[in-house]
Amino acid sequence: MKVRSSFIMAAIMAAALIVAAAAPGVAHHSFAAEVDVNTPTTLTGSVTKLDWINPPARIFIEVKGSDGKATKWEIELGPPAILMRSGWTKNSVKAGDMVTVNGSLAKDGANLANARSVTLADGTKVFAGSSADNQTNQTNQ
């Protein structure tokens, strides 16, 4: 009976170790792993979609280059709870709105940026809930 209990305990411990080892693989990515704070960017474009999801919320925009060619960008924002405390609502941006995003580019060169602030179509500048810093609401600055 003692051998069986030891075997069960060892199996439980092994399962716990496997779960613990797998946890970092499913965890949310870190800001520093994906975004380079030393590559600031300003992007102005037309909103194609807002994903009000947790975390992070995302805006998808289409930016026209000097050659007139449109490039699709994914912009990471903070979690919806932080955005709401900063004055955002699900209706702050709509498809077709022109916005200007200040943030940092992805390290891998993808069309991905982490926003610090977003200037909305009406000219209101709002904090984007970035994981890069702990700024407060920047509304109307």
Image (cartoon, helix red, strand yellow):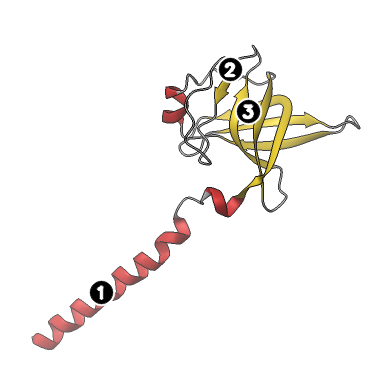
Q: Earlier in the sequence, mark 3 or mark 1?
A: 1
Q: Position of residue 52 (x, y in %)?
A: 51, 30
The residue to which callout 1 is attached is: 13
> Which residue is drawn at the image coordinates 44% and 30% (left, top)?
82
The vertical placement of 70 against 111, above or below, is: above
Between circles 2 and 1, the one closer to the viewer is 2
Mark pair 3, 2: CA separation:
25 Å
Res 104 quadrant in image: top right
Q: Quadrant of the C terminus?
A: top right
Q: Residue 81 placed where, x, y %? A: 41, 29
- Res. 94 image quadrant: top right
| Mark closest to the chain's N terminus, 2 or 1 | 1
What amino acid is at disc 2?
A: Gln
Marks 3, 2: nearer the viewer: 2
What is the C-alpha distance between the residues marked 2 and 1? 55 Å
Residue at image x 42%, y 23%?
85
Residue for badge 2: 141
Residue depicted at x 65% and y 31%? 102
Name the residue that disc number 3 marks. 49
Dot 1: what SS? helix
Question: Contact (CB < 8 A) between labels 3 and 2?
Answer: no
- Nearest the viewer among 4 and 131 is 131
